[in-house]
Amino acid sequence: MSAPKPPRLFLSPPHMGGREEARVAEAFASNYIAPLGPQVDAFEAAFAEHTGIAHCLAVASGTAAMHLALRGLGVGKGDVVVASSLTFIGSVSPAVQLGAEAVFIDASPDTWNMDPDRLREALAALTGEGRRIKAVIPTDLYGQCADYARILDICAPYGAPVVADCAESVGARCGGGLEADDTNRHAGAWPGLAASIFSFNGNKIITTSGGGMLASEDAELIAKARKLSQQARENAPHYEHLELGYNYRLSNILAAVGLGQLEVLEARVAKRRQIFRWYREALGHAPGLSFMPEAATGKANRWLTVLLVDAQSFGVSPESLRLALEAENIEARPLWKPMHLQPVFAGCRAFGGSVAEDLFLRGLCLPSGTAMTREDVARVSRVILSAARKQA
Ligand SMILES: Cc1ncc(COP(=O)(O)O)c(C=O)c1O
């Protein structure tokens, strides 16, 4: 008889704080089993309070939030939308679905986020060709804020609005360095951003099982998005429509889960950062292994701990490590495959690309769920180190 498998360690499973069920029970008691209701209102207000972004709209997903942001900015056929290449497809698909042309920007080797120098090059080249840049979408990769200050400076002369993709960076900070100070802002709360989107998908640092938030200082943009998210219904007793919208609202039940999750967000950030430190202690000394760098201009939430493997000096490729982990019932995952390499975007332009390609080939996302113990991290680390020993 074979030995029982050790319990599965998932990449980033949901982690309830304990008060979510009571919040859901409140929603049931009031019978607001609907896509609108007091829990949605309270979740939007609590998120606005937590992030410091004035206007928030709770929606069905981060992708829906991005779609609404771009509709709000008037993105359409023939426009250009410039986005990070090293990202998840939900960052980019809404722009293309609206008829825009996506142009991808390489990652910076220092932060892995959108490279501001490449962005500058792209905006100059595209504008020189007479193209209109309708939006720039930097992703806060794996929970680290992009360099909003530089990106906004570069975009300003072109009048290109910036939409921050903060799907992965809920709870992260930008601008203040590692110590809290008054320039320390929540991800997506940087002055001058047109809008920011967040995801509460099941694998994120806090979750509503599925859900998202669109946030902006621009009350009009959020009001427009709110209307579009409810099938663009006009203000009339019957159903009157002057334009087409979507059914994108967040369920009131899921908003109740979100309220409970928001209460534990800061604790979740602290734990993800702790998990990162445990990995670094266990693996940081091994030749050929390093980790995603942290920018000096913020405090990442370390949504996922990302390992960079130099196969030559470590002796094992990231894919062999992934398989060795899988054999021990541990889930690990390659980095996002850059958008400029995705078959669905074949023919799209990219400015640079080699940094993102190299990170994709050498990176591995390690289990980072906040219910993990130090022993869980040690278990993952042992498998990684022993895979190298077996190879030696
Ligand atoms: C960078 C990024 N953008 C957008 C999304 C889309 O969010 P959702 O899955 O909630 O639609 C995600 C995650 O899922 C993401 O990681």
Image (tube, rainbow, N blue to C red):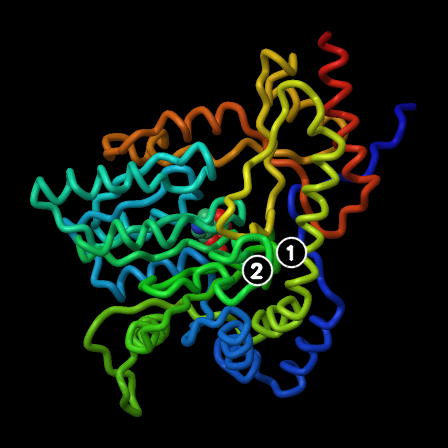
Position in image of residue 122 (x %, y %) = 22, 39
**Given the image, on which type of amino acid does mark 2 rest?**
Gly
Left or right: residue 36 versus residue 82 is right
Which residue sits furthest right? Answer: 1
Q: Earlier in the sequence, mark 1 or mark 2?
A: 2
Image quarter (top left, top right, bottom left or bottom right) of the N terminus: top right
Residue drawn at x 46%, y 35% as measured from the top left: 110
Q: Residues within 10 Å of mark 1 (few under 14, many from 20)?
A: many
Is 59 in front, or is 295? 295
For the question of whether residue 91 can be seen, the reply is yes
Q: Quadrant of residue 284?
A: top right
Q: Are marks 1 and 2 in contact (CB under 8 Å)?
A: yes
Q: Quadrant of the C terminus?
A: top right
Secondary structure of the residue carrying numbered label 2? loop
On residue 117, which mark appears? Answer: none
Q: Please determine whether, in this image, residue 323 is positioned above or below residue 71.
A: above
Q: Is the CB–ligand 1 distance for label 2 below 8 Å? A: no
Question: Disc 1 to disc 2, how far (Cα)?
Answer: 6 Å
Which residue appears at 45% of the width and 58% of the height? Answer: 62
Q: For the point 54% across and 53% down, which residue is it?
A: 177
Q: Identify which residue, 95 or 194, lies in the foreground.
A: 194
Where is residue 13? Give x, y as percent. 67, 50
Residue density around tag 2, few if under 14, some if 14–19, many if 20 or more, within 10 Å? many
Q: Residue at x 35, y 34 (%)?
A: 106
Against 63, residue 227 (above or below) is below
Q: Amino acid at mark 1?
A: Val
- Residue 171's disc is 2
**Residue wearing tag 1:** 269
